[in-house]
Image (tube, grey):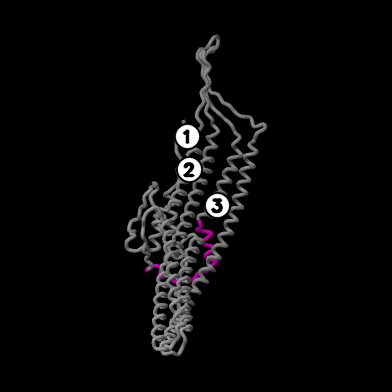
Amino acid sequence: MLAVLAGCGVPTHGGHAHVATQVDQLTGRSLGPASGSDKPILPDGVSLEDGLTQDEAVAIGLWNNAAFREVLAELGFSRAELIHAGLLSNPVLSVLFPLGPKQLEFAAKLPLEVLWLRPKRIAAAKLDADQVAERLVQSGLDLIRDVRVAWVDALLASKRVRLAEEGVRLADRIASLAEARLQAGDVSEIEVTNTNLAALLARGEARRIACDLELAQQRLISLIGLGFFDVALTLDDSSAATAAAFSVDVGRLMENGLTARPDLRAAELAIEGARERVRLARRDFLALSGGVDANEDGSEGFEIGPAMEVGIPMFNWNQDGVARARAELNRSLLSYVTLRDRIALEVKQAHARLRAAEEQAEIWSHRAVPEIEEAVRRAEKAYVAGDVSVLLLLQMSEQLLEVRTRQIEAVAEVSRARAELERSVGCRLESSLARTEPPP
């Protein structure tokens, strides 16, 4: 009766709730409902009409990204494997019918080895299910990183469009100055032609950058799960613009990465599961069945009594199963070491990338841009006064646009590097690192 009751029970594990809790603890973001839907669902408090912030894009992506929701469906398969591990084999009933001189006989048999093998099978299946859940948490972190980078790319493209439009206006203004000086007889028609050509090239570049913006927006829309629908996005970068620099210590980051990374936890669970399967394989050859045997016409009439069937392990001790389980354990150990080394490399590279990006952004924003803007203003005044040629003014204007482009690219690279570092560490930087003021 105990064996039957145990076989009727259904083992459970965290499933979608576990993944949602882990993602929320590591990133502060929530997953959407477990049930699938072919229509987008916006999280509470998120609207596309007032501008899409980076956090809102991440929230929408976690709720609607089709590829991520498809991966989450693996939880159903791991639950099915866990249920299968807890099932008992059905009893077997054998009946000999009383035909001719043969009396009626029957025997019922129920495997008993499951009484000590079932707990180990369930334990191994639970570890596998938890491993799947941790890998899905890592998939969520990867999606968050991808959405953040795509949002930064779209924002960068929009800023480059505005910068290109400013370049067009600047080129038109220089062309107008050249026309005025031509009317005054101060310059030749060749200089005017050069300014008009520069204005034409600026318009062509602006059209190309506008196309890049559309492509970046479409990629972002696809990542957040709205690619099938007609959606127009307006990005809101008011919160992203205030990000402060971090005092990042690579040793502490590596420690956090080895603690928080879900894929490393999944590798640890794989080792535990492999060890459990080794122990299970060493006992899996045991075959013991209990039952009853009865006949209709014995020496005392109807007779019934207990029976037992034992497999004699003379030749097969499940040697192949044990060898396979040990090989799986060895591979799991090596996979853990490989992943640990890769996490260390990813953290170091992301740390170095963030430091370099912050230094570059500091140079372009606080030194290069102010200097070139002042130089262009002096060159325009000098050109109006006739002290410099139009060629020098064009060169200075092109340098201004180039420096401003480098500036916004450097700021975008800081955001990309920050997103990559948080993914490498496995949690938000705010949760483990102290903020410092930007360097002077």
Residue type for callout 3: Glu
Residue type for callout 1: Gly
Determine whether, in the image, residue 100 is placed left or right of residue 390.
right
Q: Position of residue 432 (x, y in %)?
A: 47, 65
Nearest the eye: 61 or 234: 234
Which residues lie in the magenta part? 238-261
Image quadrant in which you'd find residue 184? bottom left
Q: Is residue 239 magenta?
A: yes
Assign a secondary structure to mark 1. helix
The residue identified by callout 1 is 7
In percent of the image, x 48 and y 54: which residue is there? 139
In percent of the image, x 51 and y 57: which residue is there? 261
In the image, residue 36 sits, relative to residue 103, either above or below, namely: below
Task: Give how far apart the Cα atoms at labels 2 and 3 are.
Answer: 21 Å
Q: Which mark is residue 77?
A: 2
In the image, residue 116 sits, relative to residue 166, either above or below, namely: above
Image quadrant in which you'd find residue 169? bottom left
Q: Is residue 89 magenta?
A: no
Nearest the eye: 221 or 293: 221
Q: Nearer the viewer, mark 2 or mark 3?
A: 2
Give the mark, 2 or 3, whose residue is nearer the N terminus: 2
